[in-house]
Image (cartoon, helix red, strand yellow):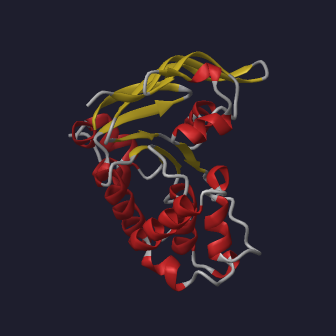
Amino acid sequence: MGALLELNSLHVSYGKVEAVHGVSLRLDKGQISTVIGANGAGKTTLLLAATGLLPWQGQAFFDGQDLSRLETEERVELGFCLVPEQRELFGDLPVLDNLLLGAYVRRRDKAFVRRGLERVFEQFPRLAERRSQFATTLSGGERQMLAIGRALMSEPRLLLLDEPSLGLAPTIVRNVLQQVDRLRHAGVSILLVEQNARAALDIADYAYVMEAGEFVLQGPAADLANDGRVIATYLGGSVE
């Protein structure tokens, strides 16, 4: 289907400290790729660099377009959207207003905004029920749905998800990731960063294992889920 996102020999530093060491990644259109690894491995740093929120060196392309020439807002207009680890909702605003902020770059296009709301409420009926509630009153799972819904308001072609399972009960994690899988089938390509390796590998097409700023393993997600090293280190099993 062709690559939507390509990162080639990407280096990312915080001052003089390099956090990501020349990694290369490819995400094909209509697929979910996941980056798994322990806390501090460099996963979030990689996402922030891809979105233009951190400086980087190397090559990065979105559907063949050179990302080094684009500001973060321009990337959003192309269909790039990040759901950050801490969700960063406006707790003192209702659900509806949080969603409307996701369409900020197209806020004057009323048809675009209306279409976005219809799409989000179809994907997450719970948000439609709670549209007038303040975000701070939502449960953890509902807040994650709202964070994803806000991103969907920009009609992204690529959704970058940073630790969507963080702080959620296992049953809620399954529900959230089922919704992520639905988005893939609706045509949204997804780069998923996740510490919950088992949950991520269950829905991903391709996977990368990141340790100390480098990819130490990669391959089809189903293969990595059966890899002895991944089982021993990330899935709580043992190598026979």
**Residue 91: which quarter of the image?**
bottom right
Q: Count how many numbered circles sit on residues in the image.
A: 0
**Residue 133: which quarter of the image?**
bottom right
| Quadrant location of the C terminus in the rendered image | top left
Residue pictured at 66% horizontal, 35% vertical = 72
Report the side of 36 relative to 47 (left or right): left
Q: Position of residue 238 (x, y in %)?
A: 29, 45
Report the side of 46 relative to 219 (left or right): right
The answer to whether one can see residue 184 in this image is yes
Compared with 226, 208 (above or below) is above
| Quadrant location of the N terminus in the rendered image | top left
Residue pictured at 53% horizontal, 67% vertical = 114
Compared with 134, 163 (above or below) is above
Nearest to the observer: residue 48 or residue 64:
64
Compared with 45, 177 (above or below) is below
Q: Position of residue 100 (x, y in %)?
A: 64, 65
Report the side of 115 relative to 76 (left or right): left
Q: Position of residue 84 (x, y in %)?
A: 61, 51
Q: Position of residue 101 (x, y in %)?
A: 67, 61
Report the side of 100 relative to 17 (left or right): left
The answer to whether one can see residue 166 in this image is no
Residue pictured at 67% horizontal, 39% vertical = 73
Nearest to the observer: residue 218 or residue 99:
99
